Structure formats: C-alpha cells, structure tokens
Amino acid sequence: MLDHVMAMTHELSPAYLHALERYRKDNPHTRLGSASSEGGFPGYNSGIMLVDIERLKQSAVIKSYLERSVLYGRSDHYKFRGDLGDQDLYTLIAFDHPELFYTLPCQWNRQLCQWWRDKGYAHIFDRYFACSGRIKVYHGNCGSVMPSKVKVN
C-alpha cells in the first residue's frame, strides 16, 4: 500500500454525483462524483476497508480533518453535506488527498444497493454499478437482498 493510509472500493452508485450537485454546477469540468468507468472519482464505500492503523494515527492530514474548522471549511468548499457517516469523511479527504487511499477492485465490496436507480439516475446508474469478474465479498447495503446461492470455485 506504499504510503496509503487505507484502502476501499469506489462507491458503486451516483450518491456523490448527487451530493456534489451544487459544486459540479459551479465546476463543470470536475471529475469528482463521476463514474470511475469515465475516468471520474465516484467517492469511496466504507463497507470493506483495509486500514494501516499506525499510518492512520500518524497522519497529520487525517488529524487535520478531525478539526471542526477544517472539516467545515472543506465541506463548504465542495458544497457538500453527506449522510453516510465515516464514508463521507473518507471521500471528502480523498477529494483533496487521493494519495492517502488505495482503491480496491470492486469485487472486494460488491455493493448490491440499487436505490439510486429509481431516484432520477436510471440513465447513468449502470455506469457506476457495473462490476465484472468473480465477486469476493457481497455488501448488502441499503436493505438489498443478498444472493441466495453463490457458486464458489
């Protein structure tokens, strides 16, 4: 993980496209919130995380985001108010400091939630949700149904 503090998969929904709507309107060339399949950064999903605890404890950047003034300042900069807890914090930090994060392949956190598909994003949902290859870990987020039969090789 080189100098990475933690590793996660990308968010497999347009949640951050939605959350960054005002920022993206003012910054039409940003890749923040865009699908990774289009070269964007869709944010992270913290359902599965690998964390180097020592690096986390030693990271001045991470510590700085725990200060109210920094957290609010960066949130205001991105016109961002999240509702996904720790995942929003990691994503916010990654907007400014992607070097602290390693992106795991989507198969390590195959999110099953399709809530955003029916919330005005059907036309682009599959750009985010696509994840081919052998799934390692299923994530039954937002009350989604876990697969009942999974073939194990």
Image (spheres, rainbow, N blue to C red):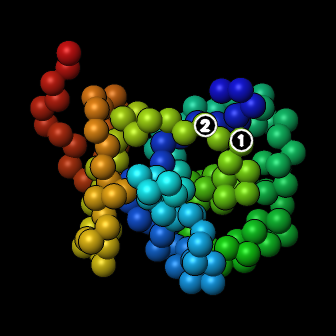
| Closer to us: 84 or 110 | 110
Q: Is residue 85 left or right of residue 99?
A: left
- Give above or below for 136 relative to 70: above
Residue bearing the label numbered 1 = 100
- Give above or below for 33 relative to 7: below
- What crowding class fits label 1: few (fewer than 14 Cα within 10 Å), some (14-19), or many (20 or more)? many
- Secondary structure of the residue carrying tag 1 is helix
Point out residue 59 in the picture as x, y percentages from the top left corner. Answer: 83, 40
Q: Quadrant of the C terminus?
A: top left
Query: Disc 2 residue type?
Result: Tyr
Residue ID at (44%, 35%): 105
Q: Is residue 69 left or right of residue 3?
A: right
Query: Disc 1 residue type?
Result: Leu
Q: Is residue 146 left or right of residue 97?
A: left
| Closer to us: 59 or 39 | 39
Point out residue 37 in the picture as x, y percentages from the top left corner. Answer: 41, 52
Residue ID at (20%, 49%): 145
Residue ID at (70%, 34%): 4
- What crowding class fits label 2: few (fewer than 14 Cα within 10 Å), some (14-19), or many (20 or more)? some
Q: Quadrant of the N terminus?
A: top right
- How far, Cα to Cα, is label 1 from label 2? 7 Å
Q: From this viewpoint, is residue 85 visible?
A: no
Residue bearing the label numbered 2 = 102
